[in-house]
Image: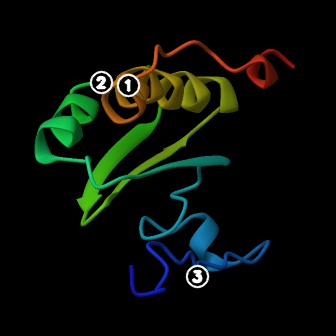
Amino acid sequence: RDGRPLWLEAGRIEGGGALLDSPAGLAGQPVVGTLLAASPQVSEALRDACRAIEPAAGEGGVTLLPGLLVARWLGPQAEAGQGWLRALWQVLRPALAGRAANSPRIWNT
């Protein structure tokens, strides 16, 4: 690697600002979530497998960049977003780490 970051989050949404309700911002939704998977093994097939998982509520999207898979969710309640991101993790963990997708204990707190 050349030392450049794989991902740099530069978004800034001010309380009461226009981006809270703008379709280009949060579209009036109160919760956002992001999952990043950095690996030389991320592939179009893995991206497509993640895209096939529909969120129960809200909207999710998955993007593939060189060496980085980015999943974003926007919706009405944290539990729905967490459920979708966990479902993606169930696909990603075995494919990228070669390990069973057992939930980390911290997720139970």
Identify the residue position indicated by label 2 in the image: 53
Q: Position of residue 61 (x, y in %)?
A: 33, 47
Q: Which mark is residue 10?
A: 3
Mark 2 or mark 1, earlier in chain: 2
| Among the 4 quarters of the image, the one containing residue 11 | bottom right
Identify the residue position indicated by label 1 in the image: 98
Label 1 environment density (alpha carbons within 10 Å; few <14, some 14–19, many ≥20): few
64 left or right, relative to 23:
left
Q: Quadrant of the N terminus?
A: bottom left
- Where is 41 relative to 102, above or below? below
Contact check, label 2 and label 1, Cβ < 8 Å: no
Instruction: Give the secondary structure at mark 1.
Output: loop
97 left or right, relative to 78:
left
29 left or right, relative to 45:
right
Label 2 environment density (alpha carbons within 10 Å; few <14, some 14–19, many ≥20): some
Mark 3 or 1: the one toward you: 1
Please report the residue visible at 77 percent of the width from the left and 73 percent of the height from the top. Answer: 16
Please report the residue visible at 46 percent of the width from the left and 13 percent of the height from the top. Answer: 100
Mark 3 or mark 2, earlier in chain: 3
- Where is 4 relative to 58, above or below? below
Q: Nearer the viewer, residue 6 or 58?
A: 6
| Among the 4 quarters of the image, the one containing residue 9 | bottom right
- Where is 41 relative to 81, above or below? below
- The alpha-carbon separation of the residues under discs 3 and 2 comes to 27 Å
Give the amino acid type for the residue marked by disc 3 in the picture.
Ala
Mark 2 or 1: the one toward you: 1
Instruction: Give the secondary structure at mark 3.
Output: loop
